[in-house]
Image: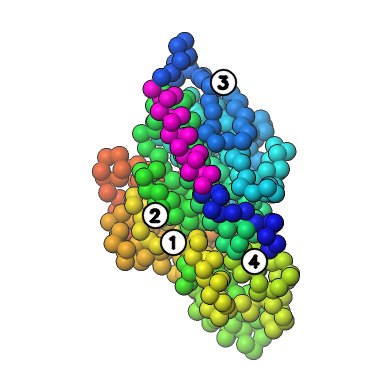
Amino acid sequence: MPPATRSSTTRAKAAIRAVAATAVVSALLTATAPPAGAAGADAHCARRAHLRVPGAERQQADCLEELTTAGTVASGHTDPADWAGLTPKDLAVPTGVPGIQIDGYFPDTRAAASTGNTNHGWNHDAQFVIRLPDHWNGGLVVAGSPGVREQYANDRAIGDWVLSRGYAFAATDKGNTGTAFHRDGQAPGDAVAEWNTRVTQLTRAARAVVAQRYHRAPSRTLATGMSNGGYLVRWQLENHPELYDGGVDWEGTLWRAEGPNLLTFLPPALAAYPRYAAGGPDAEQAHARLLAAGYPAGSEFLWPFHHAYYWDLTQRIYREEFDPGFDGPTEAGTPFCTPGTPACDADYAYAERPAEVRRAVAKTALTGRIGKPLITLHGTLDVLLPISQDSDVYADMVRRAGRGALLRYYRIEGGTHVDSLVDAFPDRLRPLTPCHRAAFTALEDWIGRGVRPPLGHTVPRDPAADPATLLTSCPLDA
């Protein structure tokens, strides 16, 4: 990428450290000295005019009768396109959560602003949303978006539910969005590295805003998220455990300089799947290659969809982020190229690429050295991030790092990467949304009452359970 199109990670970190100092001072001042005559902390939308998000370049605070998507869709305070395809169609929508919503963005870290996020007509990345319910339970939940989606992507799967339980909720677009996210940053790996600093930045700012609104700091701060959002939970608990009391990692992406990572298991799928689907004389060999790459036996019914919509695009845009030199001046490769053609991503061999590629991935790499309790859940039929190449590996990393006592890892039988696929295959899949909620409540008991969750294991899918039961229940002790 041209140097003018990439932001400086060093400048980003310096700016965020400055914001952190401001956030701490703001939290202390506002939490201990509410102005005379201020409305009580339990009043509807109390102190809205006094709320300031430390470090924000722009913010807009609105008093809403409903903070969940039951109201925000109609009021324009969410974007359904952000969360499309992430949840089952019959997932219930809670109601009865009035309060304050703050939308805004943090300054960009380079002269040429990153503009992939067009929400509110702002054309500015590093957008965030903070929701502050009138009836607060004392906690704060922070999330980063999955994939390359924007700040409202977690509203249906996570935000609605935690708000209905009384939590304040904050989410970020991670600083760059869309399929061209790799254009951000000054060097390979910078765009993904910014995701981590943006979550840290939002967590510190949101804690300060909570203190302003309720006259006291949150009693617990929990990180959670799915896919890339789950990766962010892992990274935060490894690198900033002081900010959180714990986290729930919903099938987080694994980045390791030595592999496995997306760039090691997607190319074999791109090369082998067309031969498998064609059913020719080498179909059996192609099938064996897919299984060897980590795609589980029994998941074959999901391969056509993932080949058409996920594998090719994901490989190309993340390869462009970490290894733009692979295809020279071409940006993010050639869609669905035939193996053997020049610079085809189906032929990409991560282990054979220059050391600079591994150095780029190392900017984002995980270590397993978590510092607070973490619950990880992952579906056994995930064919975007195959479980054997991702969470199985990460759980082992945590144990090898000597942090196994802080981890509970649940392999969810019949779960896949996005819950909307459950609607298409209700007899073969189970949704992970109720498993995330079961893990979240288990984390609450773990850090709040000292009740340790069941030891990690594979949670079976009851073949006799109907879809309605699977949508509302996921006993982790099964």
Residue at 53% from the left image edge and 21% from the top image edge = 50
Residue 366 is marked as 1
What residue does disc 3 label? 49
Residue 319 is marked as none
Q: Of marks 4 and 2, which one's residue comes earlier in the chain?
A: 2
Q: Residues within 10 Å of mark 3 (few under 14, many from 20)?
A: few
Establish if 37 lies above or below 85.
Answer: above
What residue does disc 2 label? 238
Tag 2 and tag 1, C-beta contact below 8 Å:
yes
How does the figure colour the protein chain or chains? rainbow
Q: Residues within 10 Å of mark 2 (few under 14, many from 20)?
A: some
Specify start and end residues of the magenta stretch as a single range.
14-32
Residue 320 is marked as 4
* Position in image of residue 12 (x %, y %): 55, 49
Q: Secondary structure at mark 1?
A: loop
Say what amino acid the circle numbered 1 marks.
Answer: Leu
Say what amino acid the circle numbered 2 marks.
Answer: Glu
Residue 286 appears in the figure? yes
Q: Of marks 1 and 3, which one's residue comes earlier in the chain?
A: 3
CA gap, disc 4 and disc 2: 26 Å
Residue at 51% from the left image edge and 44% from the top image edge = 16
* Position in image of residue 234 (x %, y %): 43, 55
Q: Secondary structure at mark 3?
A: helix
Say what amino acid the circle numbered 3 marks.
Answer: Ala
Tag 3 and tag 4, C-beta contact below 8 Å:
no
- 246 left or right of 156 in image: left
Residue 336 appears in the figure? no
